[in-house]
Amino acid sequence: YWINWVVTVGSEFTASGILMQRWFPDSSVWMWSAIFAALLFICNAFSVKLFAETEFWFSSVKIVTIILFIILGGAAMFGLISLNGTADAPMLSNFTDHGGLFPNGFLAVFIAMISVSFAFSGTELIGVTAGESANPQKDIPRSIRNVAWRTVIFFIGAVFILSGLISWKDAGVIESPFVAVFAEIGIPYAADIINFVILTALLSVANSGLYASTRMMWSLANENMISSRFKKVTSKGIPLNALMISMAVSCLSLVSSIVAPGTVYVVMVAIAGFAGVVVWMSIALSQLLFRKRFLKKGGNVKDLTFRTPLYPLMPIAALLLCSASCIGLAFDPNQRIALFCGVPCIILCYLIYHFKRSVTKAKKISQEEYQADHIL
């Protein structure tokens, strides 16, 4: 999971630098990447509040743009706004023509799921932030519900409009479907507007990724899985050592994306995408087992602050669908490396975990025996 986020952060810095070249074509990608990395490091190093404020404004730009896109795109799709000066509206024809919803078969859906899931990674940060919430019993359930309906509106709604206005045959050969839609509607400077929105979106992901990877290192240090140096925090509650290492490795992945894009970087991205789905699977499995053990120990479901809807169907469905997306990787030669690299990486992590756990347990037993001998 930590690898997932540090690779993501490095990728977002690289992409942000490339986007800036639209307005400053003679500038260096490295320069902009370094500037954005420094700014986000400062935001995360001072206080959690500054991180949250930064993330709020980044997200606000995305939300406003997507809402406008859904409203204007929906109006154009059903003929309320003319496209390119004509009254023709596609209505729902793109969902029925060109081979229908699944022109290449349903297997293509599972093959694409890892890439799609990678775009949704970050929703699990709700659990990561629980430890820094003033009132987790109230804030976390509310955040979970908000993520659910916002996903339906902003993600599914936007994709529905995109699919309705642009056929799948054209979507892969144009620069940006959002730019194409805004340009078709007649919005001036559409490309520049979307370029700015995508830039804020990339920085938002990098900001969240830096926060997540830092807290993950801090958590591992608290569990004695890595050096205790990484669980030290500043007076503001920031694990600065973990933040510096996460940023440093993110910058290394940034370098690999340019120096070795076809070798090292491909392997890192493959592991990162696979890790994101595996994390979701572990969350679903944890929820499934937690409820069973909670009831076995005499707990009452009504005492739970947040109860998973449609339990146990929801976590089981999550497990099956995530498993199907992982299996789909085997059918795509370009993404198969995720399995070859991801599975051994997970096995190695578990072996290290159980080894360190057994060593810690043995030390604890030895200390208890030593203390017992001295008492006797």
Image (tube, helix red, strand yellow):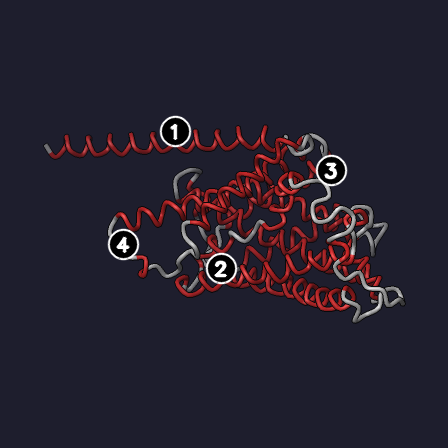
Return the disc, 1 or 2, that comes first in the chain's sequence: 2
Nearest-to-viewer mark from 3 and 4: 4
Dot 3 amino acid type: Ile
Q: Which residue in the structure is indicated by mark 3? A: 258
Residue at (83% x, 67% y) in the render: 187
SS of the residue under disc 1 = helix
Dot 4 amino acid type: Gly
Q: Residues within 10 Å of mark 4 (few under 14, many from 20)?
A: few
Return the disc, 4 or 2, that comes first in the chain's sequence: 2
Across and down, in percent, residue 19 comes to: 77, 52
The reply to whether dot 4 and dot 2 touch (C-beta < 8 Å) is no
SS of the residue under disc 2 = helix
SS of the residue under disc 3 = helix
Across and down, in percent, residue 8 comes to: 62, 45
SS of the residue under disc 4 = loop
Q: Which residue in the structure is indicated by mark 2? A: 144
Q: Residues within 10 Å of mark 3 (few under 14, many from 20)?
A: few
Nearest-to-viewer mark from 1 and 2: 2
Mark 1 vs mark 2, CA separation in Å? 35 Å
Check the image and name the residue furthest to the right.
Answer: 85
The reply to whether dot 3 and dot 4 touch (C-beta < 8 Å) is no
Return the disc, 3 or 4, that comes first in the chain's sequence: 3
Residue 188 in view of the camera: no
Check the image and name the residue furthest to the bottom.
Answer: 80
Q: Which residue in the structure is indicated by mark 4? A: 299
Check the image and name the residue furthest to the left.
Answer: 376
Query: Mark number for residue 262?
Result: none
Closest to the observer: 115 or 217?
115
